[in-house]
Structures are given as structure tokens and as C-alpha cells.
Image (cartoon, rainbow, N blue to C red):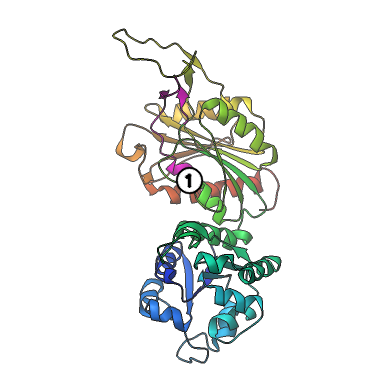
Amino acid sequence: MQERHVVLGVTGSIAAYKAVDLASKLTQAGVSVHVVMTESAAKLVGPASFRAITGLPVSTDLFELTNPFAIEHISLADVADAFLIAPATANVIAKIANGIADDLLSCTALATRAPLLIAPAMHTAMWDNPATQENVNTLRSRGAMLIGPDEGRLASGGYGAGRFAPVNQILGETLRVLGRSGDLAGRTIVVTAGGTREPIDDVRFIGNRSSGRMGVAIAEAARDRGSRVVLLAASMELEPPAGVEVRRVFSAAEMHAAVKHAVQAADVLVMSAAVADYRPETVVEGKRKKTDDAWMLNLCRTKDILASVDGPPLRVGFAAESDDLVENARRKLADKSLDLIVANRIGSPDGAFGSLSNQVTLLDRDGGINTWPMLPKREVADRLLDRVVKHLVDQRGETA
């Protein structure tokens, strides 16, 4: 992946301390983060904190010449792949909306041609003020992306709109914007994740141990490479990533309907969810009372989603097996008309549900087989998408 640069503008909101965490997460994602601070922000959070996190100089002065990006407002504007102001005060929003450039941050904002992302943070009365709303609408009309603000408890002790959006949401939206020129730009990828739950009564269900981590990793990786991602999320241990379209499902039947609808406009389907093979034949209305008698459940097969849904052009399946890993995966590859299948062995430390890493074997429809070492699930996702891109080019005769 090519080097990506974000100019992070930090203004004098009490939420400025959260920008340190944001800078850290962007850096961990492989982004070069160039921090520009207003004079007020530097009184709330020391520039040294950002320097330690990003490993890059922090810019605070319009005419500072100790930085390789002097003259700052021009050089930083040119290097930026995205300009993110987080947190953004009402004052800075007003400056940018009205073309005022009296400090380094506002000068850089006017000079850059990079996408502008703004994460406001201010008191509710300031956010609701007609002047602020008019400025926000002006920036939106020019193509700026607003992230938040949320509604909740404010630093002042009050409650209302104006709260800084969650750092992970800002991170996800920024990475999505940075990925617009990636090798999956213009594609739509449908990813299923988590484990379905089959109701027994209004309280109980049959479920499985899927955490959804692999599906979320694939969704994040596809988003960061420019794809429009539709995540069909069953029960998961973690929140879906920002910057993707999330559609919640509960049962295998709901997942089937969601997949059937989503793939109509998709280029790729990655079926990483653990969909139940069986469901109770009948569902008790309300809650079944506990008795001394045994409760016998008759189970019937659920519909095989991959076998019953046509398209999209590229189909990727997953096989969690306890024995005969390659043989069972190869059979599923053929039976479900898949292009690729990812097989992993359950019941071992490297195939445990909920783990942060996995050891998998990838098989393709042409007979190819690759076993990868134990890797973080995000790296598994990136390697898988490398193969997806290759198949889109080689087998479909398309340009990635």
C-alpha cells in the first residue's frame, strides 16, 4: 500500500486530548500524521505528545522554519492526502467557511486541495447556534465531510449535541477517504460476519462461537482499499467498523435474505459468517416455562446460502473444519461454485474462535493451494484481498 499522509488539525476544544489517541491509531494504521495545532490547542495538549506518537514534527507557527515542511501552510497543504480537523471548534469552522486565514491551521485549510474532514466538538448552545449551522452547511456544500458531533454528556456537565465523535468512528471515516484510490476503488464487496442465532422461544436460541473478528478485519481491509463495503453482521463480540454499510441480521433465514438482496449490486461476496446449519423446527411463543421434564428439540436444515444465491462475479467462502481440512474445503469449493475458500482448523490454538490471529489454508478453483503461517487476522484479510484483486483481473478480464 502506498504511503498515505494526513494533516491533523487540532483546535482549542477540551476534546483536544482525544486527538492524541486518534493520531496514535492513524499512525498504527500506517498513516503519516502531520499535526497542526492552534495556539489554544497547544495550551491544552503539549505538542511533544503528538511528536512522540507520530514521530514527525508538530507545526504551531505560521512562519516556523525548523520544520522540513516550511513554508508550512503551502507544504503541508501539498503533502496531505486528507486534511482532518479533530476536534474542530465553532471558531475554526467559522474561519474556514468564511475564508479567514489568520493562523497556520486556517491557512493550510484554504491552501489544500485534499478532502476535508471535520469532527466538531463544542457546547450544545454553540453547535445549535444558527451561525454555526450556516457555516457547517456552507462547508458541506463545498464537499467537506462532517463526522459527528454526537449527543451525550459534555465537559461542561450538561447533556446535548456537540460531543466529539468516537475516535474509532473518525479513524474509520478517515481511512475510508484515504482508500478512495486503492486497488478496490469502484468495487462493492459484501462481507458476512459473526454467528447467526436460531430462536427456540422468545428468550432462548441456538448459536455458535463465532466472534466476527475475521469478517470485521476483511471489511476494514476492503474499506481501506477503496471498496464500498456492505457488512452483513450477525452476533459479534465487537462493534462494526466505521466507514462501511452495516446491516444487522439475527438468524440464518435473515442472513439468506440479506445476502440475496445485497449481492445484486456487488462485485465480490465474502462469506465469513458462521451461519447455522440447523434451526428448531418449531419456535415456542413467549418463554417456555421450566419443568422437570426433558425438552426435546427437533432440528431441521437451514438453507445453504452460497448454494442457493446466484452471483456476484467473485465468491469467497470459509470452511472451519475439525478434520480432513483440505479435502473438506476442496469439496465445499466445488459444491458451492466458489472462486476461493479459506480453510482453518478448529479445536486448536491457531483456530480458536475469538482469537486475534489465525492460521489458514487458501484454495482456489484452479487447484491452487497456499498455507499461510499464523498471522494477525487483519494480515490474513489483506492477503485474501490481494488474491481477490488478482482474480478480478486475471479471471474476469477486468482492470483493478
Residue wearing tag 1: 216
| Above-or-below relation of 276 to 382 | above
User: Looking at the image, which is closer to me, 264 or 158?
Assistant: 158
| Figure quadrant of residue 18 | bottom left
Residue 289 image offset from top left, x and y in percent = 36, 15
Q: Position of residue 291 (x, y in %)?
A: 31, 11
- Please say whether residue 212 is one of the residues in the magenta stretch: yes
For mark 1, does the 10 Å Cα neighbourhood hold few (<14), some (14 to 19), or many (20 or more) residues? many
For the point 46% across and 27% down, which residue is it? 197
Question: Residue 178 is drawn in which quadrant?
Answer: bottom right
Q: Residue at x 46, y 37 (%)?
A: 194
Q: Is residue 1 left or right of residue 181?
A: left
Q: Position of residue 370 (x, y in %)?
A: 46, 42
Looking at this view, is 398 or 243 the one in front? 243
Q: Residue at x 37, y 79 (%)?
A: 46
Visible residue check, residue 5: no
Vertical placement of residue 82 versus 304, above or below = below
The amino acid type, in three-letter code, at marker 1 is: Val
Residue at disc 1, secondary structure: helix
* In the depicted structure, whether residue 303 falls above or below residue 133: above
Residue 284 in the magenta stretch? The answer is: no
Image location of residue 234, percent across then percent down: 49, 35
- 92 left or right, relative to 352: right
Range drawn in magenta: 196-215
From the image, give the main secondary structure of the stretch colored magenta: loop
Does the rendering let one see residue 209?
yes
Count of number-bearing discs: 1
